């Protein structure tokens, strides 16, 4: 089985894997930051192509200072009943033989997601890590727009009908830069909300009864995240 690889140079590295979904994966970045700081290593991400947004994530991950490589491999995800399952696999099956750690949901999280992942391997995490969106040369050159953006769920079309829908089946670095430049960003309680929060992008997150407990998904500073609670009748 082959792997599509994006890499820079040769580094002392370890492999981290995750099987999705997007928001669930992003918490691994806080662990990657901690591992790099504590162990002085770089991170080689090994992610399955069968979760489609991962086919668009390489540029975003390569922008992070701890990333050495991104490999997108044809590992089969069987279901998303509790995150992407199964979440444990051996990268050596795809020709990647190195120290590795699988992250995923062994059951539904009973604490903040980064802490939930980290405890399985005895790791820590940097809760204040924020996603880097620009090279050092381009930082500070953001051209603000008048766009009002929203995630693409049908409920969001009813709640924010004037906003432009976004998907996650496009380059995620470019998409996140677009959200950073936008006048407003509205999302469902979903992966794009986590992407905005971890990128320090002000966002309005729309919720209904039954959505997960906020402290499971947000810890540290999320003062620029506005949660709006709706009734189910508003989105039917």
Image: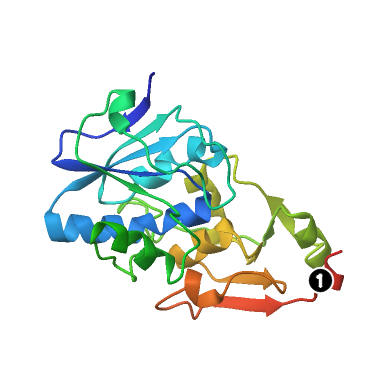
Q: Which residue is mark 1?
A: 232
Total marks shown come to 1
Q: Residue furthest top?
A: 1
Q: Residue 2, percent across and down?
A: 38, 19
Decide: is 138 above or below 123: above
Q: Is residue 133 visible?
A: yes
Name the foreground residue: 225 vs 75.
75
- Image quadrant for the C terminus? bottom right
**Left or right of 107 on screen, residue 99:** left
Residue at image point 16% right, 48% down: 41
Residue at image point 46% right, 70% down: 110
Q: Can you tell which quarter of the image residue 183 is in?
A: bottom right
Name the foreground residue: 165 vs 40.
40
Name the foreground residue: 202 vs 11.
11
**Left or right of 216 on screen, residue 188:** right
Residue at image point 58% right, 46% down: 80
**Left or right of 123 on screen, residue 4:** right
The residue carrying pointer 1 sits among few (fewer than 14), some (14 to 19) or many (20 or more) residues within 10 Å by Cα, namely few
**Left or right of 117 on screen, residue 144:** right
Name the foreground residue: 35 vs 90.
90
Q: Residue furthest front?
A: 107
Q: Residue 55, percent across and down?
A: 50, 35
Mark 1 falls on what kind of element?
Answer: helix
Q: Is residue 177 visible?
A: no
Residue at image point 21% right, 56% down: 35
Q: Can you tell which quarter of the image residue 17 is in?
A: top left
Q: Residue furthest bottom?
A: 223
Decide: is 208 above or below 96: below
Colour setup of the view: rainbow
């Amino acid at each position: 089985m082959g792997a599509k690889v994006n890499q820079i140079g040769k580094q002392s590295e370890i492999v981290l894997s995750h099987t999705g979904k997007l928001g669930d994966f992003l918490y691994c970045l806080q662990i990657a930051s901690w591992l790099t700081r504590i162990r002085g290593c770089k991170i080689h991400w090994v992610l399955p192509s069968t979760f489609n947004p991962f086919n668009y994530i390489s540029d975003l991950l390569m922008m992070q200072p701890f990333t050495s490589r991104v490999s997108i491999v044809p590992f089969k995800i069987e279901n998303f009943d509790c995150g992407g399952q199964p979440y444990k696999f051996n990268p050596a099956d795809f020709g990647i033989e190195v120290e590795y750690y699988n992250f995923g949901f062994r059951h539904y999280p009973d604490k903040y997601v980064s802490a939930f992942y980290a405890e399985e391997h005895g790791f820590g995490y940097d809760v204040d890590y924020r996603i880097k969106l620009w090279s050092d040369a381009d930082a500070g050159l953001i051209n603000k727009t008048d766009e009002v953006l929203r995630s693409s769920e049908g409920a969001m079309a009813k709640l924010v009908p004037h906003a432009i829908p976004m998907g996650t089946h496009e380059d995620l670095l470019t998409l996140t830069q677009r959200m950073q430049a936008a006048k407003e960003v509205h999302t469902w309680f979903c992966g794009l909300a986590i992407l905005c929060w971890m990128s320090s992008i002000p966002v309005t997150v729309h919720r209904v009864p039954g959505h997960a407990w906020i402290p499971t998904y947000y810890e540290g500073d999320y003062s620029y995240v506005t949660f709006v609670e709706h009734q189910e009748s508003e989105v039917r």
